[in-house]
Image (spheres, coloured by chain):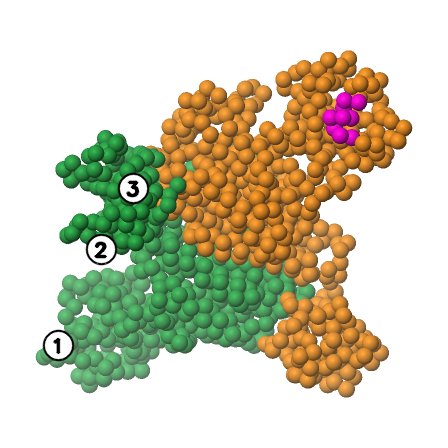
Chain colours: A orange, B green
Amino acid sequence: MRTHYCGELNKDNINQTVEICGWVNRRRDHGSVIFLDMRDKRGIAQVVINPDNADFSLAETIRNEFVLKITGTVIARGEGLTNPKLSTGEIEIKAQNIEILNTSKPIPFQIDATDTSEEVRLRYRYLDLRGDAMQNRLRLRSQVTRYMREFMDEHDFLDIETPFLTKATPEGARDYLVPSRAHPGEFFTLPQSPQLFKQLLMMSGFERYYQIVKCFRDEDLRADRQPEFTQFDVETSFMSENEIMTMMEKMTRGLFKSVINVDLDDNFPTITYVDAMEKYGLDHPDMRISMQIVSMDKLMQDVDFKVFSGPANDDDSRVAALKVPGGASISRKNIDKYTKYVSIYGAKGLAYIKLNEDGPTSPILKFLSDEMTAKVIEMTGAKTGDIIFFGADKTKIVNEALGNLREQLAKDLDLFDKQWAPIWMVDFPMFGAGDDGSLNAIHHPFTAPSVDTKILEQTATTALSRAYDLVINGSEVGGGSIRIHQVKMQKMVLKLLGISDQEAQDKFGFLLDALEYGCPPHGGMAFGLDRLVMIMTGANSIRDVIAFPKTQTAACLLTNAPGSVPRKLLRELSIQVSLAEKD
Amino acid sequence: MRTHYCGELNKDNINQTVEICGWVNRRRDHGSVIFLDMRDKRGIAQVVINPDNADFSLAETIRNEFVLKITGTVIARGEGLTNPKLSTGEIEIKAQNIEILNTSKPIPFQIDATDTSEEVRLRYRYLDLRGDAMQNRLRLRSQVTRYMREFMDEHDFLDIETPFLTKATPEGARDYLVPSRAHPGEFFTLPQSPQLFKQLLMMSGFERYYQIVKCFRDEDLRADRQPEFTQFDVETSFMSENEIMTMMEKMTRGLFKSVINVDLDDNFPTITYVDAMEKYGLDHPDMRISMQIVSMDKLMQDVDFKVFSGPANDDDSRVAALKVPGGASISRKNIDKYTKYVSIYGAKGLAYIKLNEDGPTSPILKFLSDEMTAKVIEMTGAKTGDIIFFGADKTKIVNEALGNLREQLAKDLDLFDKQWAPIWMVDFPMFGAGDDGSLNAIHHPFTAPSVDTKILEQTATTALSRAYDLVINGSEVGGGSIRIHQVKMQKMVLKLLGISDQEAQDKFGFLLDALEYGCPPHGGMAFGLDRLVMIMTGANSIRDVIAFPKTQTAACLLTNAPGSVPRKLLRELSIQVSLAEKD
């Protein structure tokens, strides 16, 4: 229907007769001449319609977002009328024929307007997606998956599809259920990840598998989560964690170079879990920020200030300081704001020392000797103009409070020292412990520990796993591990997690069986594609890198899904709605 | 962990020390020497373990499907001991070190055995998948999607993901439902295809979209259907049906050449629906078979044989003949079998005339004059040694009976004239009519008719659609159409389908709205990937081209999905099982 795309016309086309199709991005009447900015997926070109054109009166009916086919001649724009901002800015198309392929009602917001509420954008997603921002993000997303696939193809991985209608596995979040009609009263589960199937593919001798696949979690939605999300999923046999990490790092580096022309570090730094918690308070630290948390436990053990000495003398607690360069200028009001911010994580206050021109000032100076204050300044390396914040509480609270405060302050005060900071996080604990002493899996129950069954049983709470996470700019974009490949170890781990033999058999009997028939050593990784693309595009929300996302209440404003269903359909599925019984 | 793959070793590696990993495909004790056939994803190599090896007693414990790492030296096989069937047949590996990475219980069936029941294969899918047949099919499947993606990338299509948790759309089969926890009493639907979303992407200005995506249909399962299946899905704007068909044909031709080295016809023949029904009885005829159905209506209008003259004089009925070359040798018993076969389609009998050396014989000869019999022979072109079968009944019954009989006979008597026969089916009717005169969509309600709204309203039952199907060897591997892009036409079609304004608004309000905001002319196509790969691999079932398929009762024998779910989880979803209420 077209000879050219609008966005590709230039001086070389002058005097050519062209046919273009697209949308009216903007229509302007200049006295007796009508100008149309015609938009297609490659860009915008200006069309001019003179009053002597037979279709002039038709053109007068044209409004924004009408769909047109225009036949015309490319001509040079008059002097002073060129538009250097447009690739097509040196030419325009003198229309001969105009065909209205479709009309449009007045649109509820300007395409590419930046102040449209997200609710309206999602309601009229088909208009929102016409704008440059969303077009570019989804084009980049397509380039990202293309690069990944080409890399995996080159490295001899097979793209193998795993089932969507499957059985519950314990990834930690709630499952979405799908009632079965053929098996009344029974349910399928939508996968939270293809974890068990990709392991089964290793047991099936494929050795190298990948897939870019939708996964599902019925979570209480946070700002950056979606009920359905996309995973770039990889599994290999006969490779060590270092070999897997090296290959995935190469993929990541190539991806950033190829798609957004960013050179990531040649060797991503490796940080241990213990180190990250001590220095950055989080297991996914943003390493664009050089600020570190400094432990003050030893220093504070004997101070006459219970707020500090208490935690300093408790094994489960911690006293730590965070020096913020230039932070002395933070106002009292903003310190109150940060105090409120750390309270989200359970901190009961936010002590600080400001280093002004005339020396340190702080409400807590009175509790510390001058010598002690000097030591704190020395240990944190604080200088005049800085501020030192303190955390003193249970270790978990201090880490979360100061770890998140560190990243919030970096944003507020622009304390980023580099643009891109990819790291590998390693040496995670195998288990976390609940308040009742029960163990839970830090990654998932199929992650291999770095010790054998005997030692694991004796040292469960301190044992490390063979897991690794890829963190870029403070976001966990991928994670993986070497998996358990021996049935004895798998049963031991399930037992340590408090899963009875019967429950294990019911839920993972097929996996336990399969482990007994020559399961190779294997491991892999999964990337959160939405998160990764969000980081690469600089979008503020994963909803901005998904064509048709759900809202934070897991609804689709465009289609109004979910919706009610005729009772007859539910009867066929042997279920009924039971609102009263809800907890 | 390895220096080489087993399957890649050859004479060039002689004297090299190699490390290989893999499975024991077969273990043989030859007197005091142990031979292991080691298998990995690239193939098989023979390992020899001599009695002087320090690991010899360990090797004695090795059984089939153990997972080993072997370090050894590649040596030439002795004279007369080479195996020309194996790429590695000229060498063997003299083992130095043997490491058992995992053991295996005795396996329930031999890998690559051809007589294993499908039930056992699916139960132990991870063993079944280790065999060459499944490895090759899934490798080919991965190559197919890779080719498709590369083709679409080259043609500037974007890979865009559409939602899985969405709203019911009317594709004809039952939907799978997903209860929403956030919206008690409401349900998502798993998509039967991304149809509406890909149309919305055209309205969003993307112009060229593709996706390889899982779709879901809760159908009564037939031999070649799966509750979840994979679709290669394409949509474009501003392209005519011919342009789309040309592009998709080029893709298909390139795919067959690239992946299985088959040259498909340069121009796929185009057959109209009316023509196909008349000559082949089916709208997806297998054109590897040159046999055609010949209409006898005019000839039989005045015969004194009500079985023929009745249908010949009825507009909704048909008399037709199918000549089968060499069919005179079909036994009485087999004719009974075919009579039973056509009864599946409602045929009440299967009249025939055999042309033996001594002339025509048939139970119906007595009802036909010699002249009439001669005319039948002339019209069908039958020769001595052939058989002519007749169908005389409602047109639908005759077409289905003779159309399917034609293909069954071709299989039984090997009457295929070529290996590959791709065709385009075009000029489908827009609507089918139910017994009560109500209309239903032959494709789906978003397919554009080839006439305008006014004419459509007047000629609904005879109007043609702008749909096209790609049929290869009698299988519909793909189908598509130009879509309705104007709201007036869409409302007209929904009205003709008996969908009330209210129902239309409830179900597709978002689509009707979107059509009013500058929807471009658009169309597309979808390929059934499973079916296509099945044809390309020559597999007998789509279950043989899917890693983890469901059975015909929509269950997974490996994981035992679906399964029961704790009542607590159902309560959180505001549903309960209600077996008693089932119809």
Bin the neighbour count of mark 3 within 10 Å (Cα to Cα): few under 14, some 14-19, many 20 and up: many
Where does residue A140 sit, x and y in percent of width and height? 61, 57
Residue B356 - label:
1
Q: Residue at x 41, y 64 (%)?
A: B477
The answer to which quarter of the image holds residue B31 is top left
From the viewer's perspective, tell me whether residue A191 is left or right of residue A336. Answer: left
- Write down the region rendered in magenta: A374-382
Bin the neighbour count of mark 2 within 10 Å (Cα to Cα): few under 14, some 14-19, many 20 and up: few
What residue is pinned by disc 3?
B72
Residue B85 - label:
2
> Residue flagged by tag 2: what amino acid is it?
Lys
* Helix, strand or loop status at disc 2: loop
Task: Specify the subunit that label 2 lies on.
Answer: B
Q: Residue at x 48, y 40 (%)?
A: A242
> Residue flagged by tag 3: what amino acid is it?
Gly
Q: Residue at x 83, y 29 (%)?
A: A354
Where does residue A513 sit, x and y in percent of width and height? 35, 34
Task: Specify the subunit that label 1 lies on.
Answer: B
> Residue flagged by tag 1: what amino acid is it?
Asn
Front-lying residue, A273 or A263? A263
Spatial CA span between label 3 and label 1? 70 Å
* Helix, strand or loop status at disc 3: strand
Spatial CA span between label 1 and label 2? 49 Å
The answer to which quarter of the image holds residue B364 is bottom left
Can residue A521 be seen at all in this image of the molecule? yes
